[in-house]
Image (cartoon, rainbow, N blue to C red):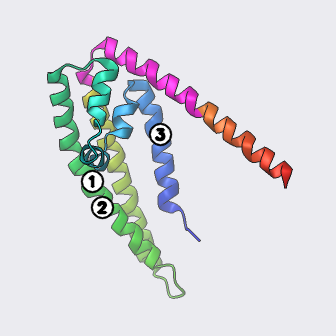
């Protein structure tokens, strides 16, 4: 059984973040450019997200370098905060017992709220800094691609729902 304060909050933050990303037209950058993803893909020999973004919207070498610098700077800070948030979540989970400490739970929950708020702020700042690097034409191209990807996701979700409904009818 999972007690979902952290995951629910993360889901809400993700939804808010997606709305902001749509406004700036840089959701691809903000969501997919995490240090672990970059490291994992680089290790596998696949192009990283900055390379993919460069191909998608035609980034210059200078733009790619600037974006990588922004991401490296911000992801370090965000990564540290995420580690702190995970540690707090574990502490809170450890309090799920008969002799729980309500003050400790509330204190950790408040600190977790502060951390997730700071993560959201830094993520948005990173997104805004990256967006500033793009030309208007690049923003327009990225926005168009994001809309296409969103439509594809919605279609896939609808298909999955239909399949689940058909499976339930067959049982």
Q: From the viewer's perspective, is the residue at label 2 or at label 3 nearer? A: 2
Q: Secondary structure at mark 3?
A: helix
Q: Is residue 139 left or right of residue 163?
A: left
Q: Are marks 1 and 2 in contact (CB under 8 Å)?
A: yes
Judge whether 166 appears above or below 90 on screen: above
For image coordinates 68% across by 36% down, the residue present is 158
Quadrant in which residue 123 is drawn: top left
Q: Residue furthest front?
A: 45
Mark-to-mark CA distance, 3 and 1: 19 Å
Q: Which residues are magenta?
A: 132-153
Residue 75 in the image: x percent, y percent? 24, 46
Q: Which residue is mark 1?
A: 79
- Asked whether, in this view, residue 164 is left or right of residue 97, the answer is right
Residue named by callout 3: 16
Which residue is nearer to you in this view: 123 or 153? 153
Query: Label for residue 129?
Result: none
Secondary structure beneath label 1: helix
- On screen, 50 above or below 85? above
Between discs 2 and 3, the one toward the N terminus? 3
Magenta stretch holds residue 97:
no
Quarter of image, res 31: top left
Q: Mark 1 and mark 2: span between their CA atoms?
A: 6 Å
Q: Is residue 47 left or right of residue 1?
A: left
- Callout 1 crowding tier (Cα within 10 Å): few <14, some 14–19, many ≥20: some
The residue tagged with tag 2: helix, strand or loop?
A: helix
Which residue does the image show at 49% across and 57% down from the upper left?
Answer: 7
- Check residue 135 for magenta coloring: yes
Give coordinates of residue 41: x percent, y percent: 30, 44
In the picture of the structure, the residue carrying the numbered disc 2 is 83
Q: Write the residue at 74% across / 47% down.
A: 164
In this view, the residue farthest toward the bottom is 99
Of residues 79 and 169, the one nearer the viewer is 169
């Amino acid at each position: 059984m999972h007690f979902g304060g952290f995951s629910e909050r993360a889901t809400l933050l993700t939804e808010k973040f997606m709305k902001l990303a749509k406004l700036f037209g840089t959701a691809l950058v903000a969501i997919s450019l995490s240090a672990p993803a970059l490291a994992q893909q680089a290790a596998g020999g696949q192009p990283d997200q900055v390379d993919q973004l460069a191909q998608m919207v035609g980034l210059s070498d200078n733009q790619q370098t600037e974006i990588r610098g922004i991401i490296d700077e911000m992801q370090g800070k965000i990564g540290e905060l995420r580690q702190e948030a995970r540690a707090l979540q574990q502490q809170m989970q450890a309090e799920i017992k008969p002799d729980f400490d309500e003050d400790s739970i509330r204190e950790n929950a408040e600190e977790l709220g502060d951390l997730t708020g700071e993560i959201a702020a830094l993520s948005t700042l990173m997104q805004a800094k990256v967006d500033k690097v793009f030309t208007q034409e690049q923003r327009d191209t990225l926005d168009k691609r994001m809309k296409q990807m969103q439509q594809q996701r919605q279609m896939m979700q609808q298909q999955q729902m239909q399949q689940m409904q058909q499976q339930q009818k067959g049982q």
